[in-house]
């Protein structure tokens, strides 16, 4: 999308995006199984992240996740966090040993959940559009009358082991944009050390930030773009290269070569939603060209 695109054309693209997304065949929908293992009702499983198995799953719009209670105690699967409480997206209520609970995911997003009876039990569902190793993290929207001037977006690697948080302010013409990048564990807890990654930011097709082979010892760092040529959206890509010391690349662990994407958009409203819709269509188009059919 370019700065010369008219508002009328943006509305047309939005309608096309929504039409494609909402008319994709349901045959691609899948069911992902998650087990509540025996012993999860006793503290300890959280130390190995095995209170839900797997603790984090990646699904696509239209997919269903089914939790089976393979423990001897009753549990809940409740969206939200133990710290902040239920967020209202879904709640299984109490379901007994030997029974299951299913939840369909139609909306893109990152969904943490926990057991209200045993709050050390936590898990995560990432709902994304497929297509190779690129994961759309969503859109940071800042500014406007009712929006903060700075906000944070969160994304997760496809294996659920790395949680990436990026904070940004509103992109402003003739100013530099500050990006704060943090890498956490799957539950959004402590910072992960010795992160190796690349970060690239573009605006109107021009590169305003490019740092390759970054090593972050403490799991948090600041990046500053060049002077922006407009107040148009800024696209950011973070490529995970692994975790480990700079001189021990052969021993690096974790996701390698995985790309997480986001977009910083000034002001909240229809324009931001259109950008997100067009991004979804673009991902589907690229996926089709590579002959990898996403599960939507």
Image (cartoon, helix red, strand yellow):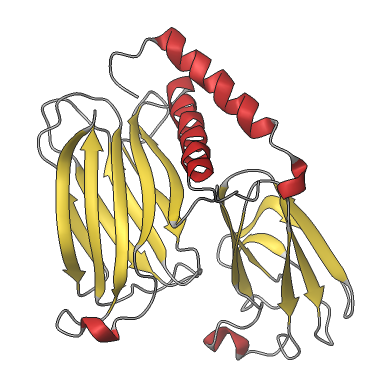
Residue 232's spot in the image, x, y percent?
27, 25
Which quarter of the picture shows residue 219? bottom left
Seen in the picture, residue 102 relative to 1 is either above or below; the reply is: below
On the question of residue 94 being in view, the answer is: no
Residue found 13% across the figure and 37% down from its top: 176
Which quarter of the picture shows residue 83? bottom right
User: Is residue 71 shown left or right of residue 99?
Assistant: left
| Quadrant position of the N terminus in the picture | top left
User: Is residue 288 shown left or right of residue 103?
Assistant: left
Q: Which of 129 and 121 lies nearest the eye of the viewer?
A: 129
Seen in the picture, residue 239 relative to 187 is either above or below; the reply is: above
Residue 116's spot in the image, x, y percent?
71, 70
Q: How many marks?
A: 0
Residue found 32% across the figure and 64% down from its top: 240
Seen in the picture, residue 43 relative to 294 is either above or below; the reply is: below
Which quarter of the picture shows residue 45? bottom right
Residue 265's spot in the image, x, y percent?
35, 32
Seen in the picture, residue 155 relative to 183 is either above or below; the reply is: above
User: Is residue 203 shown left or right of residue 229?
Assistant: right
On the question of residue 159 being in view, the answer is: yes
Residue 187's spot in the image, x, y percent?
50, 70
């Amino acid at each position: 999308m370019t700065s010369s695109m008219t508002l009328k054309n943006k509305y047309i693209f939005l309608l096309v995006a929504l039409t494609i997304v909402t008319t994709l065949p349901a045959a691609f929908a899948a069911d992902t199984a998650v087990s509540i293992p025996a012993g999860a009702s006793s503290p300890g499983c959280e130390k190995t992240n095995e209170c839900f198995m797997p603790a984090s799953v990646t699904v696509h719009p239209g997919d269903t996740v089914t939790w089976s209670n393979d423990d001897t105690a009753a549990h809940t699967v409740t969206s939200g966090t133990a710290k902040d409480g239920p967020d209202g997206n879904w709640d299984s209520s109490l379901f007994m040993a030997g029974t299951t609970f299913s939840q369909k995911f139609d909306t893109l997003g990152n969904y943490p959940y926990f057991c209200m009876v045993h709050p050390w039990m936590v898990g995560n569902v990432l709902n994304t559009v497929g297509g190779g190793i690129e994961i759309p993290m969503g859109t940071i929207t800042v500014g406007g009358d009712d929006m903060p001037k700075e906000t944070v977006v969160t994304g997760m690697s496809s294996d659920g082991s790395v949680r990436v948080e990026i904070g940004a302010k509103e992109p402003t013409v003739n100013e530099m944009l500050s990006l704060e990048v943090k890498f956490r564990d799957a539950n959004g807890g402590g910072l992960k050390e010795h992160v190796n990654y690349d970060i690239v930011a573009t605006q109107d097709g021009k590169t305003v930030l490019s740092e390759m082979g970054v090593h972050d010892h403490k799991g948090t760092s600041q990046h500053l773009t060049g002077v922006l040529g407009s107040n148009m959206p800024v696209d950011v890509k973070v490529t995970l290269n692994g975790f480990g010391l700079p001189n021990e690349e052969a021993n690096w662990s974790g996701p390698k070569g995985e790309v997480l994407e986001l977009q910083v958009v000034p002001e909240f409203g229809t324009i931001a939603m259109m950008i997100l819709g067009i991004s979804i269509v673009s991902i589907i188009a690229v996926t089709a060209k590579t002959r990898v059919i996403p599960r939507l």
